[in-house]
Image (tube, rainbow, N blue to C red):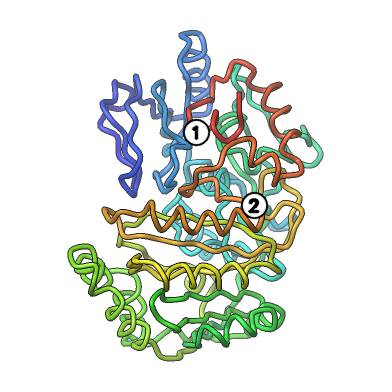
Amino acid sequence: MGTATAGKNGAATAWRNWAGNVTATPVRTVTPASVGELQEAVRRAAEQGLRVKAVGTGHSFTAAAATDGVLLRPQALAGIRSLDRTAGTVTVGAGTVLRDLNVALAREGLSLTNMGDIMEQTVSGAVSTGTHGTGRDSASIAAQIRGLELVTADGRLLTCSEKENPEVFAAARIGIGALGVVTALTFAVEPVFFLRAREEPMGFDRVTAEFEQHFAENEHFEFYWFPHTGNCNTKRNNRSQGPAAPPGAVSAWIEDELLSNGLFQAVNSLGRAVPATIPSIARVASRALSARTYTDIPYKVFTSPRRVRFVEMEYALPREQVVDALRELRAVVDRSGLRISFPVEVRTAPADDIALSTASGRDTAYIAVHMYRGTPYRAYFTAAERIFTAHGGRPHWGKVHTRDAKYLAGVYPRFAEFTALRDRLDPDRVFGNDYLRRVLGD
């Protein structure tokens, strides 16, 4: 989680993100109890010449939310505001944590159509950085937004949808905090449904050769490759009539502890202390997996707990180029002295119409690389980034990357449309910071 040492609306000495790789020292931290208080905090900061950033749970690995000005914590703006079953929408406060939203929707017999694999983020933080899961037909969380409220640099509250302020709506669904502070989001929802998950170990050569087939045959396909091995774990999620048949205790423990948490933590700690052990650990860990099938409601299938802290880079590539890029990454790892203890994750998304979405205008596949927190990651990430950018990759806005506005303008056809809107809504860069200067320019 992100942490800040501060009173309710007092001076903050420091803020640190979940991974611990980004810190900031704001002049003050404000926790508004209402939208009106948030508007006033923005107006006051602008009058004082201070910059403003809103921060959720700090799950971004970039400095997207870092500020030396006023840090807004919108956690009090949480919970379901309204539910419209006829329209199939739910409106929630921006500070709502995805976990709480998923549980509340399930209680109402409703669900989002698709989601990412963790649910510790606030809804506004998740959508602002382009958080996504995997899907053949269903896209990122931001693509499921039907309306939003945005506090702009002059303290006004804009209501945005396809009908109201449509040009702001088109861009602000993934705004990286550059256009204003999101205070509420309206999502499309549907009656809750069951997903049948099929997890199966598969060789690297087979899964890459059959990638397009697996993608075409499954609503949600993803796989993990274990570096230093030829082993992968595949996951296929498809709608089912039910009933619920959650994973058994043993297989749940293997997934939860071996791959995600307690045992994985110990293995990574050993790897950090003695890097030479990593390839043999990877071989053992990847062979410990066995096929399993289970059925449950969506958030219990899509998401899993993540207690082991790490640093991550993820790039979105044209889907038809992902297999070549992954093979190149494997070749680099195999001939280098790199020791990688985290699996490499591959997911997909259909093209969408959001200006700064990593899937904007093109069918997309993602490659995510991770390193255990505290382990030197630059050599690995630099090598991976070189491959991804050679394929016209777009970096995830909330994950480690080194790209700048010049590069990004070349891979986002609607980049200038977004920056022009930013110039109109925030000409004085009240919501600016060093990260936005790098990725969007001045």
Q: Position of residue 277 (x, y in %)?
A: 23, 74
Kind of residue sitting beneath label 2: Thr
Which one is in front, 349 or 327? 327
Q: Is residue 225 above or below residue 69?
A: below
Q: Is residue 407 above or below residue 193?
A: above
Q: Position of residue 261 (x, y in %)?
A: 29, 69
Residue 216 placement: quadrant? bottom right
The residue at 53%/86% (across/down) is: 198
- Apparent side of residue 353 relative to residue 195 in the rendered image (left or right): right
Q: Which residue is mark 2?
A: 358
Kind of residue sitting beneath label 1: Tyr
- Apparent side of residue 322 relative to residue 19 in the rendered image (left or right): right
The residue at 68%/55% (across/down) is: 359
Report crowding for label 2: few under 14, some 14 to 19, many 20 or more residues within 10 A (C-alpha): many
The residue at 60%/53% (across/down) is: 389
Q: Which residue is mark 1?
A: 435
Q: Secondary structure at mark 2?
A: loop
Residue 240 placement: quadrant? bottom right
The reply to whether dot 1 and dot 2 touch (C-beta < 8 Å) is no
Disc 1/disc 2 C-alpha distance (Å):
17 Å
Could you say which disc has been placed on residue 311 in the image? none
- Apparent side of residue 174 relative to residue 258 in the rendered image (left or right): right
Q: Position of residue 423 (x, y in %)?
A: 68, 22
Q: Outermost residue toward the front?
A: 335
